[in-house]
Amino acid sequence: MQPHVGLLASPGMGHLIPAMELAKRLLTHHRFTVTVFIVTTDSTTTRSHILQYTSSLPSLNILILPPLDISHKLGPDATLAARVGLTMFDSLPSLRSSILSINPRPSALIVDLFGTLAFPMARDLGMLTYVFITCNAWFTAVTVYLPVIDKQMEDRHVYHHEPLRLPGCKPVRFEDTLEPFLFRDGPMYEGYLKAAKDIISADGILVNTWQDLEPAAVKALMDRDVLGGIPERAVYFVGPLVRGREAKPEEKREEVLRWLDEQEVESVIYVSFGSGGTLSAAQIAEVAWGLELSEQRFVWVVRPPVEEDVSGSFFQVKGRKELERLDYLPEGFVERTEKVGRVVPLWAPQAEILGHASVGGFVTHCGWNSTLESLGNGVGMVAWPLYAEQRMNARVMVEELGVAVRVEGLESESEGGVVGREEVGKVVRRIMVEEEGKRIRKRAKELKVSGEKAVSEFGSSHHSLCLMTKDFLNYVEAQSL
Ligand code: UDP
């Protein structure tokens, strides 16, 4: 029997890209039929991004749910999590009718962290439920442990800033903590707690990481005795699922890639804060001056400044023209740096840039996809975390794996200050010029090999996905008896 699963992707490229990668894996390596349901706020951008998948995988079914405008339902200060959560909630009726319209229907629904509210509906339709966590195992452990966490211990973390201790894993320092803990008495925390409970109620949990990258956290999640008897369900470590480089014909290669072709090996630093990260006007200016001070070649993906919201470019309401302007950069910056750098407004072909031999370092917000893409290409990082679980990711990369240096002064940034140009220049030189950078790149290349091994035919992640397939088929068979 050919198994059929539905995969629900919540809004944002950071959710869509790994969902498509998982779909591709299930389809090409495990002979699943896969239907991807995409929730989006902007079907035009989404459509152009999924084209690259559909052209190489014609058998992948993709259904874009009708885009929703929730702007009138939430105040301007609503958090990103609240916006994504409400969009997902409002999409449930169209998801249900889409599932019902497919014949034969998928036997399971795989959702990301924001999609667990579709579980009651999926169960009502007789489907199995899976969560695909597009973050690391340490974050997964914190999340699944949350519902049983000792309240006093959590209070000490939230109110007295003591480390959050987790059985079998390293503690989470308060300065790296997750946003819901910062808003413990509000709806963000409630939403996170509910999602955590939903996750441990799922039939299976898939995590985009691999055993050798995070052995302690993986062990804690696999061992029922370690995390206080949770999770009850199977956990599968299936990563790194990252975008491969697309083999585009020469005439379709973006200008930035052609410019990279002319640069020396590992001579360019790539600067990008993910699909949603934004900086204040003052911070953008310091990054610009810092890049000049570093005297290094660069590719920098820029977005107009947003004050007081580091995830300001998700749910953008401005028009494309407005977003592509560059007049907020220091006067003459683009002209002065024309020979040594490229400024790319809004969006760049990141997987290809990181895979280019000329790129030697990556200033990143440490979103998990960006982190995996950097490791997947053996590129060392400058960690500049902004929001969500990125501080935890940065901690793992800098302290545990030794594949990144951390920008100093981010704490003062959260209090309204900015990271100065000297620090930007210094940290770029540390990764691009100094011996430390060479050591970091060597280590990143070792992890690239480790990740490739994990997803290869005899690797731990391939094995884990085979196991998930087997368990899934057993479930389906048992249900049909
Ligand atoms: N991305 C890209 N071009 C850009 C910015 C982002 O292709 O200009 C992709 C990036 O390669 C990654 C995803 O968008 O796959 C961002 O996911 P991540 O988890 O790093 O961060 P998020 O955007 O979710 O914060």
Image (cartoon, rainbow, N blue to C red):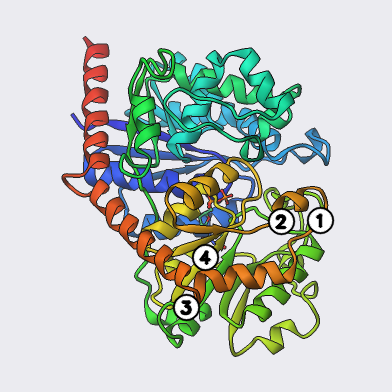
Q: Quadrant of the N terminus?
A: top left
Task: Name the quarter where the C terminus is drawn.
Answer: top left
**Dot 1 and dot 4 residues touching (CB under 8 Å):** no
Please state which amino acid type lies under the numbered disc 4.
Phe
Q: Quadrant of residue 287?
A: bottom right
Numbered label attached to residue 409: 2
Up the image or down, 345 lies above or below 116; here it is below
**How far apart in space, not on screen, are marks 3 and 4 (Cα)?**
16 Å
Percent position of residue 5, x then y: 34, 32
Q: Nearer the viewer, residue 13 or 284?
A: 284
Sequence order check, earlier mark of 1 and 3:
3
Viewer-side label of 3, 4 = 4
Proximity of marks 3 and 4: CB atoms separated by less than 8 Å: no
Callout 3, which amino acid? Leu
Q: Secondary structure at mark 2?
A: loop
Residue 455 visible in the displayed image: yes
